[in-house]
Image: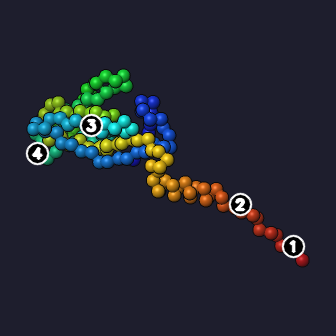
Amino acid sequence: MSFSHDESSEFPPTRDTKLESFLFTCELSSKVPFYIFQGDEEEDLEHFLELRTVCLGEGAKEESNVVEVTAMNHLGKTTSVPIANLHVKCLPMVSLGEFELKAPVTIRLKAGTGPVSVSGLHLIASQAEDSDLSEEEEEEDDDEAEEEELPSVKPAKKKKNQ
C-alpha cells in the first residue's frame, strides 16, 4: 500500500505522520441505496476512503447500475461524481486504482437495483508523537545507527618479497 501526502492534506509530509489502513467494503442495492463513510471527530486524525473496485454482485439484473460518490472538493464544496456505470453483459466490474477521498463521503446507487459491491481501504492518518513511535520503528532507527557505527574495512597487508 502506498500513501502520499499532497498540498490538500492538513498534515505536512513528515516522518512523524502515522498511517493505519483497514479493509473497507459496502454493498448497495435497491433496499440500501447509499452508504455514508465518516471518520471519528478527533482533531488529530484524518480519515480517507481509498476506493479500489466497484463490481456487480450475484443476481444483478440486465440493467445499468450507476454508482456515484459525493464528497468535498478542493474548495470545500460538496460535489457528486459518477464513478461507475456497470452492466452484467458488458462491464460487470471497474477498477478505480487508488481513488482517494477525504471523509465524509457518500456512496450512492444512482440508477439500477444492484447489488453493487464497493471495496477499498479506510486510511487513518495521525500526527505521531515521539512516545507514539512503535517498537519496530525504534528498532529500525537503532539498526541504522549500528550500521553507521561499523568500523571501516582496512585493506589486507601485502607480503614482502623474499
Cα–Cα gap, marks 2 and 1: 24 Å
Res. 139 visible in picture: yes
* Residue position marked by numbered label 3 in the rendering: 38
- Disc 2 and disc 4 in contact, CB within 8 angstroms: no
Which residue of the protein is positioned furthest toward the bottom in this rendering?
Answer: 162
Q: Is residue 73 above or below residue 89?
A: above
* Residue position marked by numbered label 1 in the rendering: 160
Q: Under tag 2, what secondary structure?
A: loop
Front-lying residue, 96 or 102: 102
- The crowding category of the residue bearing disc 1, from other C-alpha atoms within 10 Å (few below 14, some 14 to 19, many at least 20), is few
Dot 1 or dot 4: first in sequence order is 4
Cα–Cα gap, marks 1 and 4: 86 Å
Front-lying residue, 135 or 88: 135
* Residue position marked by numbered label 4 in the rendering: 59
- The crowding category of the residue bearing disc 4, from other C-alpha atoms within 10 Å (few below 14, some 14 to 19, many at least 20), is few
* Residue position marked by numbered label 2 in the rendering: 152
Q: Is residue 28 left or right of residue 161?
A: left
